[in-house]
Amino acid sequence: MTPLLRAISTLLSLALTASTAFAGSTGGALANSETDLKFSYSIAALPVEQIEQAEATTPESDLWARIRNGFKLPESDPRLTRIHEQSFTRNTAYIERIAQRSRPYLFHIVEEVERRGMPMEIALLPMIESAFNPQALSPMKASGIWQFMPATGKVYGLQQNAWYDGRRDILQATNAALDYLQKLYGMFGDWELALAAYNCGEGCVGRAQTRAAGNSYAAIKLPNETRNYVPKLIAVRNIIQDPRRYGINLAALPNEPYFLQVKLKHPMEARQAARLAEMDMDEFLLLNPAFQRRVIHTETQNVLLLPQDKIETFQFNLHQQDGQHRLQNYAAKRGEALAGIAAKFGVSLNWLTENNPLKSSKGKVAQPQTLLVPVARNTTAKTIAQVASPAIDIDKQAKRSPLRTHKVRKGDTLARVAKLYNVKIAAIRQLNENAEPLLPGTTLTIPVAS
């Protein structure tokens, strides 16, 4: 990518990131939306001739070509490398799937590896660590595309709590992995040894060096998995270098950003964020796999990744909704009934438990904790203040209005469910944020008819 295009991409990212803040009022939101969208378009609206000229001078329109130009590592163990090449090419569809799965992440990783002056083989490391599966979890509890162990992740600043696991965060985990590898390179002065230490730990490699006559990767005795680790990466490198030689059909990847960052000021359901971006949930979670409860808990992490072509859609829909479906903190007290809290905020008990790391006993809050609950539409400041403090007689209210549940089946409609239980459609809507659209498998909270 030429400096011109890279500058355009960076400016566009900054403009769109800055433009996604929530407005303080409906009018302000609409005004800000209009201004922000104009700002975004103005960054992108370069003359067509200038863009075409810049693209014509770009030598690497395919990301794979850019990656190949950065390969630096030697092939220290040809015998093991050939074994792993044969293993990969016995099932060519597997390596092709991994290469395609890397598409959302690889440009960002390549940018970071290149910026740091590291060998480009490192950009391929997630292929052998996780097959670029952001939800990968090893038997030893290593997680994410870079397969961080819990303790190592904490050392490198990756938060891990009931809301969020930074080991699965594409941006944070990539930075942490490259920081760790650079530290290991500084310790050992050799990239092969740094990679070996990434696999088995710096202590493992250090002890192996003290027992060996030499200090190189080839000279020291390592655990079998680590001995195969670098040759496996080199095998992948060789396949990417010349895929046709190995019978691999490597689809071209655009040498351009796949995603941009968006910052949120308030928590939100991941499902709602996906709707605003007009994405399906699976695609959304590929870019945002770190949120544990399918809730974007902004106090832990407030950055979303969205495909470039979804940014303006997200921004427009966000301002159109005027704060609707926003979530807020609620200080739950010990002993409060979960059903009562759910009823108070118009959600089902199932929603409350799915979206919060609840500590409960016999249907009641076991210890004081902060929950995420919806902010009702057009809630006044006075009402919000009341919502922030538990109602004194919420348990009594829950007892006066007992609740039932209904699991939505194919063909169900709100009218049909309401008729089945002899309640009003509005009463179902009031207790179920997930009532529309009505999807099979959804659990609805149903009030008992009076």
Image: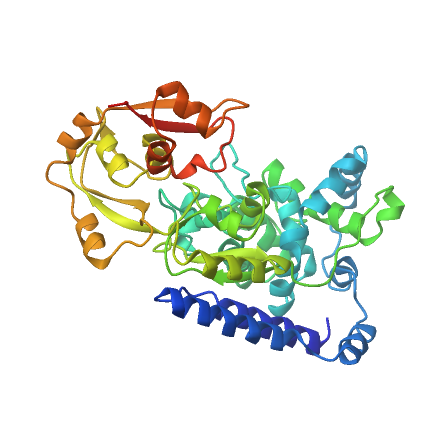
Rendered position, 416 above or below 335: above
Q: Which quadrant is home to the C terminus?
A: top left
- Image position of 283 with respect to 72: above or below: above
Q: Nearer the viewer, residue 239 or 164?
A: 164
Residue situated in front as seen by the camera: 297 or 218: 297
Task: Give the quadrant of residue 221.
Answer: top right
Judge whether residue 109 can be spotted in this image.
no
Q: Residue at x 51, y 27 (%)?
A: 440
x then y, percent, for residue 283: 59, 45
The quadrant holding residue 282 is top right
Q: Residue at x 34, y 21 (%)?
A: 422
For the point 73% across and 75% down, the residue is 2
Residue 196, x across and y down, in percent: 59, 48
Residue located 40% across and 64% down the image: 22
For this view, does 431 lie left or right of residue 47? left
Tell me the colour scheme of the image.
Answer: rainbow
Look at the image and tell me in which quarter the N terminus lies: bottom right
Report whether residue 141 is seen: yes
**Residue 173 percent location from the top left of the image:** 51, 53
As drawn, 42 above or below 345: below
51 left or right, relative to 243: left
Residue 359 is situated, as x and y percent measured from the top left of the image, at: 25, 34
The foreground one among 212 and 397 is 397
**Nearer the observer, 110 or 272:** 272
Q: Is residue 97 left or right of residue 138?
A: right
